[in-house]
Amino acid sequence: MKDPKKIICISCPIGCELTVGYENDQLSVSGNKCARGKSYGQEEYLEPKRIVTAVVKTNSATLTYIPIKTDQPLKKEYINDLLNHLYQLEVKVPITLNQCLLKNFNNTGVNIVFTRSLEA
Amino acid sequence: MIEKKYHSIVIGGGAAGLSAAYEISKSGFSVALIEREESLGGILMQCIHNGFGLQEYKEELTGPEYAERAIAKMAGSGVEIITSTTVSDLIDENGTKTAHCYSAVHGALKLGADTIVLAMGCRERNRGNIGTAGTRPAGIFTAGSAQRLINIEGFIPGKRVVIIGSGDIGLIMARRMTWVGAKVLAVVEILPYASGLTRNITQCLNDFNIPLYTSHIVSRIYGHDRVEKVDITPLVDGAPQDEDTFSIECDTILLSVGLIPENELSCKIGVEINQDTKGPYVHSNYMTNVKGVFACGNVLHVHDIVDFVTEEARRCAVNVVDYLRRKILPTEFRIQPGANVIYLVPNHYVPGEEINLYLRTFIVKNNAQLIVETSDKVVLEKKLLHVRPSEMIKVRIGEKDLARLSADEFKDLKVSIV
């Protein structure tokens, strides 16, 4: 069990300061003004995830790096592994928008997709 | 030399230009879209992070994805796209506009039009604008040029980084620099609060334990060939506390200290600039003081969300079409910034027609109140849950609200936030 944590809610611009922690074995969120704040606080406390975006090297003469993203948020502890893996790659053109680069990265269920198309 | 004529010339192929050109052409008018880069998309192409498109497409996209959707619409739209081409001069002769352009691909071009849409975007403020003391070594970049280096060219500008200013691009770059292996040592903000969006503070700084020094300035830059060190001085009530100055050794400085609409070209054709926005004064139909010359997007005022740019450009285009059809200008009244309002756009309205207003406030406040009034009557009161200078406020004053005014009561409006 972890200690209570202060988390700033990013569900909307108000930015409530949430306190998330266990109270009598129940995960409780306080400081939120709405339901979105509660679910954000819970997820951010238990299993923080992020969308990761980066660029990978291409064999194209016109664009030497092409942008990619995770198709859904990735658990934070996997981010560095993913980045290190991406830096080793060189991808071949042509590439279409949303084409998949990596399927099910490290069995997380997260796919890596291209966010730009590039002709040969 | 290529000479051609169009109903409309749109200058700039970013979010605003793409949206405006598409909408004008959809109404059957001939349009040329001129872009100085080799490809369309503008600044979106280097903004590889996500968070774009929530309003426009109801999903979260990255910059290049957002651009590609807009570019895809151009195919078959009839818009003539002229890339790798820079407009060097704009001339207005008896209502006919001429754009003089040059291009490595097309040579010299002389393009004529009935209307011009200015959509050139903005550029970054740099070290000269904030006047930081010290030497002039290599290693000082604006955040946007560092972003281009990393995301398009594939170069990493440095290893130990201090970021001046907490604007969104600076925050995004703090994360980006960290993810390419650099160490971001500090973000230094002169104001007592961060200028960027909260979600960027938490996801780009707090995630990596990057310290944010609010009410601090970088007071001196050291280094001969390359940046070696910066001095950071705290401010109390705006006064530097020299005795509390501390130093950070670094090899790179990124500047995220605001954007300025790029209006040199606008001035050449006689467009008048509002010093509060650094963009043109516009009528309710987005027309500048020069008849037939319109403006939209970041060249008009700096937006924080691209979706608003697309929307504003679309609205501008509807008015361009209306002008091309009718060429009449309605009677208008002014809309002026009142208490706590830095600026608002547009600066005029037509009696009885709905107004879509964009504005920024000086204050940070929860449960603020927006008041639209004439000198003797309140037209609209609206509660705003949270306001701050970094978040643009968008408000629609509908025909119903304006119906509170009888015909002889239409006069200048004042917009305040309390």
Image (tube, helix red, strand yellow):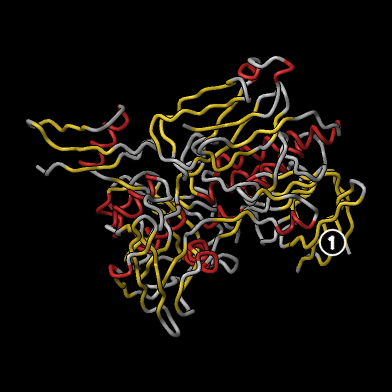
Label 1 resides on the chain identified as B
Give how far across and how far down residue A85 sits, in percent: 34, 62
**In front of the other: B26 or B371:** B371
Give how far across and how far down residue A87 sits, in percent: 38, 66
**In front of the other: A66 or B305:** B305
- Give the residue type at disc 1: Leu
Residue B103 position by quadrant:
bottom right
Q: Is residue B257 above or below residue B157?
A: above
Residue B167 position by quadrant:
bottom left
Residue A8 visible in the displayed image = yes
Q: Is residue B192 above or below residue B142?
A: above
Q: Is residue A34 above or below residue B8?
A: above
Residue B238 position by quadrant:
bottom left
Give how far across and how far down residue A20 sits, in percent: 19, 37
| In this rendering, position of residue B242 left or right of residue B406 | left
Q: Residues within 10 Å of mark 1 (few under 14, many from 20)?
A: some
From the image, tell me which residue sits under label 1: B109
Q: Residue at x 12, y 30 (%)?
A: A26
Total labels: the figure holds 1
Q: Residue at x 82, y 39 (%)?
A: B29
Q: Name, please, the residue furthest toward the left.
A: A24
Q: Is residue B114 above or below residue B177?
A: above
| In this rendering, position of residue B204 left or right of residue B110 | left
**In front of the other: B341 or B212:** B341
